[in-house]
Image (cartoon, rainbow, N blue to C red):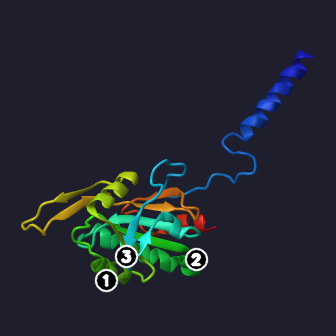
Amino acid sequence: MLMKKVLAFALIAVSLLAGCGEKKGEAPKVAFQSTDLTGASFAKDFALTDHTGKPRTMADFKGKVVVMFFGYTQCPDVCPTTMAEMTEVLKQLGPQADQVQVLFVTVDPERDTQKLLAEYVPAFDKRFIGLYGTPEQTAAVAKEFKVMYNKVPGSTKDGYTVDHTAASYVFDKEGKLRLLLRSGQGVAPAVHDLKLLLG
């Protein structure tokens, strides 16, 4: 009798362990190639203006996978490289690319005017959107998104550079933070992961 109870308990324990980490009805955990940020409690929303002068929040892009990069138009290296890579990512996604929204948020609001963003951002892909705010709005969004940026003085007052976080955030169609695309990881992992989120 005792042995039957022990065996029954063991079977229950094994069946519980088999479902450990997955709630009933949930899909198995997705194997992303980028850093998985699913369940993160930051980067929930923003309030900025796009390069056409329209106020924007994350809710405007519901139904699309959003890739959000923080940079500035006079950035000499990582920004144009990242934007060019995202152009290639959209090319490789083919028709699915229309379900992806790339957002470029400037960390240099003093120099990156609406006009400059309107020239710079869509030059990579006409679907890309540039976002800007006041210095105070920029600081608030950077804090919410855990993005670091810092002016580095140059030889003239306006000749400075800006050190900044170089990774991109990816949000699913519900506007929830899912991934961190690391700078320099290349196009292939981003294409792979965006396809997973696009379903």
Q: Position of residue 55 (x, y in %)?
A: 42, 71
Amino acid type, mark 3: Ala
Determine the secondary structure under disc 2. helix
**Is any atom of residue 188 visible in this view?**
yes
- Picture disc at residue 119: 1
Sooner in the amino-acid sequence: mark 3 or mark 1? 3
Query: On the rendered image, what quadrant is the C terminus found in?
Result: bottom right
Point 75% across, 46% down: residue? 24
Amino acid type, mark 1: Glu
Sooner in the amino-acid sequence: mark 2 or mark 3? 3
Disc 1 from disc 2: Cα separation: 25 Å
Determine the secondary structure under disc 3. helix
Q: Position of residue 142 (x, y in %)?
A: 34, 56
Describe residue 39's horizontal placement relative to residue 160 as left or right.
right
Label count reads: 3
Point 23% across, 72% down: residue? 74
- Picture disc at residue 96: 2
Describe residue 114's horizontal placement relative to residue 27 as left or right.
left
- Picture disc at residue 84: 3
Describe residue 181's horizontal placement relative to residue 150 as left or right.
right
Point 52% across, 56% down: residue? 178
Amino acid type, mark 2: Gln
Please tell me which residue lies in front, 34 or 135: 135
Point 73% across, 41% down: residue? 19
How many residues crowd around disc 2 within 10 Å: few (fewer than 14), some, or many (20 or more)? some
Sooner in the amino-acid sequence: mark 1 or mark 2? 2
Query: On the rendered image, what quadrant is the N terminus found in?
Result: top right
Disc 2 from disc 3: Cα separation: 18 Å
Determine the secondary structure under disc 1. helix
